[in-house]
Image (cartoon, helix red, strand yellow):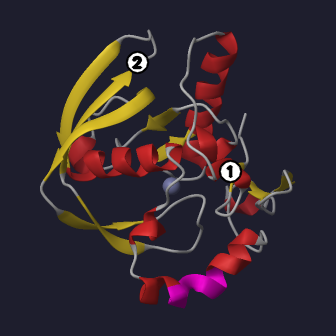
Amino acid sequence: MILPIYLYGDPIFKKPAQKVKKIDDKFIETLKDMFETMEVADGIGLASTQVGIPYSFAVVDVSAYEEYKDFKRMVIINPEIIYSSGEEIMEEGCLSIPGIRAEIIRPNKIVLRYQDIDFKVNEIECDGLLARVIQHEVDHLLGKFFIDYLSPIRLKTLKPRLVKIKRGEVKTHYPVVIPGTRKVISPEPQSREDV
Ligand code: ZN
């Protein structure tokens, strides 16, 4: 099932997500839905809060990129970045902030501690695009967006578009929730000729 994605400005992002305490069938079902949603929306990462769930987990799949073609999609539960180093500029976008992309400076190497689908604690070290996606998703779980790293001047130039997003005035090819309303806007169905 494709889940609607919550947009920038929704109260779901106002506070940090709570710890996941147990994994049950409903949780597994939600993960399946999140992978499906991420694929349909052409995302490479999706945090629980982006689909309206206030518990700390995210899904990641960077296998569409040549250098990660053997990457096995990941579920990261209660993720925590315990070490980071270096610096790198990379362009970021976000399914919750459609139409806006910006170059963001972040550490290029991280160590992530997380729990996997068996609830086992793991630590992985990564860099490049994978480190980037993970940092972006962990930020979502803390109530932070990539645009929070922009200068006040740059942010000011984006303000009119952010105001529109907060009103739900967006065009996306995936369903979204109008901030603060729980009302879902579905994309126009594609005509059969497109398939
Ligand atoms: Zn995002």
Question: Is residue 4 part of the magenta span, yes or no?
Answer: no
Give the percent coordinates (x, y) of residue 193: 73, 62
Give the percent coordinates (x, y) of residue 108: 18, 54
From the viewer's perspective, is residue 102 above or below residue 186?
Answer: below
Earlier along the polypeptide chain: callout 1 or callout 2? 1
Give the percent coordinates (x, y) of residue 20: 55, 21
Q: Is residue 39 left or right of residue 163?
A: left
| Element assignment for label 2 | loop
Crowd tier of the residue under label 1, counting other residues whose Cα lies within 10 Å: few below 14, some 14–19, many 20 or above: many
What residue span does the magenta drawing correspond to?
Answer: 156-161
Residue, x 60% and y 84% (percent of image)?
159
Give me the disc on residue 5: 1
Give me the disc on residue 46: none
Considering depth in this image, is 162 or 60 the residue closer to the camera?
Answer: 162
Principal secondary structure, stretch drawn in magenta: helix
Q: CA distance from mark 1 to mark 2?
A: 23 Å
Q: In this orientation, does residue 3 appear?
A: yes
Give the percent coordinates (x, y) of residue 102: 40, 75
Mark 2, residue position: 116
